[in-house]
Image (cartoon, rainbow, N blue to C red):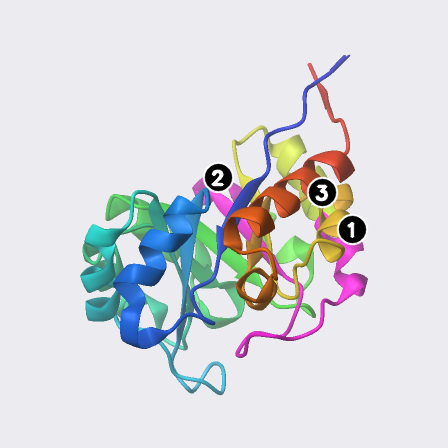
Amino acid sequence: MTESSVNQPLVVPSVLPADFARLGDEVRELCQAGVDRIQWDVMDGVFVPNVTFGPDVIAAARPHSAVGFEAHLMVVNPDELLGRYVDAGCELVIVHAEACTHLHRTLAHIRDLGARSGVALNPHTPAEVVEHVLSETDLVLAMTVNPGFGGQAYIPAVEPKIARLRRMIDDSGFPIELEVDGGITGDTIRGASAAGADVFISGSWMYAYPDGKTAAVAQLRAAALDSAPHREAA
């Protein structure tokens, strides 16, 4: 076994704190800040107590972006919506394990539609829920807040689960990204990165950063890389 180099961390903003009246401009500004892709938090008012973006809104913003889109579907019936969000320009579609009766089939369907598949876990949901669907998964998202609203405080108690997911992914041999979402700041990103996450969602903190989004992205990326563990590869 030899020590591998750490994967470059990906910084992905949520547009939840954006000015919805100027989403095209907001997307362009995020691209100029050096983000790796952009996340759309899709909420239905049932799975979570909030309502946000439909596919037509995302499709209207897509021509303004030079980076990929991911849709995080916090909805009770994701299977009925998958095709519409792929058609809207989302190259990655994330569903919640808690909302999917047949998770393996849902993830396979996302791939059949031509997108990359992701599965999200709420803070209370154990890592083992995804153990037998990793072959159909391109990304696992460990929520570090309870989904539904931006601006919540990071839950450090999720970090052992992140570490467990990291081991499961590495043992699987599949090239799966491990994403965290919720309360990610220049400080909290360090614990998530040390636990093994390599993709980081930031919303409220990035938008409020006093030196602007470009500086915020640079700080997040540097802190994540500095904190990342070196993993071994065969």
Q: Quadrant of the N terminus?
A: top right
Q: Which residues are magenta?
A: 133-162
Q: Residues within 10 Å of mark 1 (few under 14, many from 20)?
A: some
Q: Amino acid at mark 1?
A: Gly
Q: Residue furthest front?
A: 211
> Would residue 171 be found to the left or right of residue 79 on screen?
right
- Of badges 3 and 1, the one in the foreground is 3
Q: Nearer the viewer, residue 59 or 147?
A: 59
Q: Amino acid at mark 3?
A: Ala
Q: Amino acid at mark 2?
A: Ser
What is the x, y in percent for residue 222? 67, 38
| Mark seen at residue 223 | 3
Residue shown at 71% from the left, 52% from the top: 189
In the rendered image, residue 52 lying in the magenta stretch gets the answer no
- Of badges 2 and 3, the one in the foreground is 3
Q: Nearer the viewer, residue 82 or 148?
A: 148
Q: Pointers 2 and 3 in contact (CB under 8 A)?
A: no
Q: Is residue 69 above or below residue 207?
A: above
Q: Quadrant of the C terminus?
A: top right
| Mark seen at residue 135 | 2
What is the x, y in percent for residue 30? 41, 53
